[in-house]
Image (cartoon, rainbow, N blue to C red):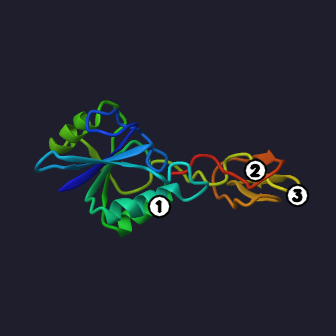
Amino acid sequence: MKICVTATAAGIDSPMDPRFGRCPFFVLVDLDSMSENSIANINSSASSGAGIQASEELARRGVSALVTGNIGPNAMLTLSKAMIDVYQYQGGGSVRDVVEKFKRGELAKISSPSVQAHAGTGQGRGPGGQGRGRGAGRGQGSGMDRGRGDGSGSGAGLGGSRGGQRQ
């Protein structure tokens, strides 16, 4: 069985990272041989869809389970469709420590997101004036990002709109 643990750096002795879509590395571990393969998360700085793209990459790599600290609704849906089980762990430690906890059955399997969607929570900076979020963060006005995240914000400036962190 191949599992993935989100990490701050490459290698099985690297610290676990609690983020999913924005973590710097995915460490894939074969539970039978304990061999690992670290993959840089090329989507960690994507302006949107980082969690979805990361989920799709793990599915392509044949991962059966993911261990992470937090996961958003879009990533959870994508992982669920790919039949990848998600386990939540927020205790820290190295990837190796987390894998050992997984093997002992100490981690909680989750079936729903642990955080809300983050799309559209940041300040919009786009040509053409200001946008202000309303209610659940659905904004109006300038910018490229059509967020559906929490909170409200306003912004004015130059360039494409960027939301806050997404998972």
Percent across and percent down for residue 95 are: 28, 37
Between 25 and 98, the residue placed more toward the observer is 25
Mark 2 is on which residue type? Answer: Gly
Q: Residue furthest bottom?
A: 81
Which label was assigned to residue 156?
A: none
141 versus 29 height, above or below: below
Residue drawn at 75 percent across, 57 percent down: 139
Label annotation for residue 124 = 2
Q: Amino acid at mark 3?
A: Gly
Image quadrant where one finds the N terminus: bottom left
10 Å crowding of disc 1: few (<14), some (14-19), many (20+): many
CA neighbours of label 2 inside 10 A, class few (<14), some (14 to 19), many (20+): many
Q: Is residue 31 left or right of residue 13?
A: left
As measured in the structure, the alpha-carbon distance from the residue carrying label 2 to the one carrying label 1 is: 22 Å
Residue 67 placement (x, y as % from top left)? 32, 47
Please report whichever mark, 1 or 3, sits nearer to the chain's N-terminal start. Answer: 1
Q: Which residue is mark 1?
A: 53
Find the distance from the CA under tag 3 to the CA under tag 2. Answer: 11 Å
Quadrant position of residue 89? top left
SS under mark 2: loop
Mark 1 secondary-structure assignment: helix
Whole-number angstrom distance, CA of label 1 to CA of label 3: 30 Å
> 10 Å neighbourhood of mark 3: few (<14), some, or many (≥20)?
few
Residue at image mark 3: 128
Residue at image point 21% right, 43% down: 102
> Taking 142 as reference, is 12 left or right?
left
Indicate the position of residue 142 as horizontal and vertical percent values: 82, 58
Q: How many marks?
A: 3
